[in-house]
Image: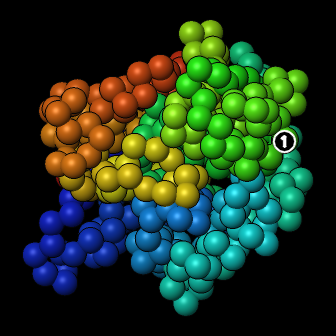
Amino acid sequence: MAANVYFVDFRAQSSKRNLLSKLEMLFASAGLSSVVRTGDLCAIKVHFGELGNDAFLSPVYARKASDAVRAAGGKPFFADTNTLYSGSRHNAVGHLETAALHGYLPPVCGAPCIIADGLKGRDWREVELGAKWYKSVKIASGFADADSMVVLTHFKGHEMAGFGGAIKNLAMGCAPAAGKKEQHSVRFFVRSEKCVACGECVEVCPAGAARLEGSAASIDKEACIGCGECASRCQAKAISMDWATEIVPFTERLTEYALGAVKDKAGRVLYLNFVKDVVPECDCNPFSDAPLVADIGVLASTDPVAIDQASLDLVTAAPSAAGSATEGRAGPGDDKFAILHPETRGQVQLEYGEKIGLGSRAYELVKI
């Protein structure tokens, strides 16, 4: 059965038809009032953005989510989990400081912000799953204990998952460090002939696995935790993994974690994908490249697979933006993410997600 995916574009004709008013219509049409009940502690899952990144979701838009939750009788709070890699969001103190610098303060976003897995990422619950890769998964307590959720996702590319949508936001975003490690059970190595010995991989490696020895870096596979931050930062593209054997299992594990994050919340989760500033890589990077396509719109659904499929289809159908990484390489009908990240398998999120019951790839786009 096809899932409803509600859609608003970015055209603004008046104060009653600007994006903020359209978001109010979107919440109403998508049925937020049936997701959030009176007295609910409602987690609004959001990515606060790494310092140096400017493509993260604006707290001005996020405010509409907290307002809508309050109107439905819920008690909203914004939340994310600490990062596996070293950076500005590696612990709750730095994470909340980063959130504040990016405007996620109650007077702006309309609700308090918490770090769902605690000070150092050790606050989580074990959730039974019984799937192919995991009998159980580790979910941050702030999400596991919440009564309902609104998942706000900035839709963009991703250097390992292919693209980052609602599924990726649930999987990595709701997992503590231990859960992120379980998903990232791949191991990286350095192609010494490409290495320029810049040392950036050494700086960002949280496990001390990357080392600079003479004219090239190296990675200790026994110490490597598979977070992939070294590969995403390597401008020389000298760091790689065994894509042929590891990328499909990685993507399946990620998808199972997404299922675990919402397993006990049937009918209590609403997803919004902002197909805006569709940059090539994750907001975990301390930079943002030019968007691949013009801003398209915002989608809402109670089905994470359907909303990601619809978002991907819209980006695929759009022409590449001038000055973007896919200009001259991809046009309408081309999968921009697959062209940018050819060794990834983003479609596995959708195919496997449907297979394990996370959602349906069939959808009906309902324009508001």
Residue for point 86% across, 65% down: 119
Residue 160, horizontal then vertical, whole percent: 55, 31
Which image quadrant is residue 87 in? bottom right
Residue 324, horizontal then vertical, whole percent: 26, 46
* Callout 1 secondary element: loop
- Residue 6 in sight here: no
Q: From what the image shows, is residue 322 above or below residue 149?
A: above
Between residue 246 and residue 361, name the one nearer to us: 246
Residue 240, horizontal then vertical, whole percent: 61, 23
Q: Which residue is mark 1?
A: 207
Residue for point 39% across, 64% down: 27
Residue for point 49% across, 57% down: 287
| Disc 1 packing (10 Å; few <14; some 14–19; many ≥20) | some
Query: Residue lying furthest bottom in this view?
Result: 107
Q: How many marks?
A: 1
The amino acid pointed to by label 1 is Ala
Residue for point 74% across, 65% down: 115
Residue 168, horizontal then vertical, whole percent: 56, 40
Q: Going by the image, does 56 lie left or right of 193?
A: left
Q: Going by the image, does 164 lie left or right of 132?
A: left
Which image quarter is the C terminus in? Answer: bottom left
Between residue 194 and residue 224, name the one nearer to us: 194
Between residue 276 and residue 265, name the one nearer to us: 276
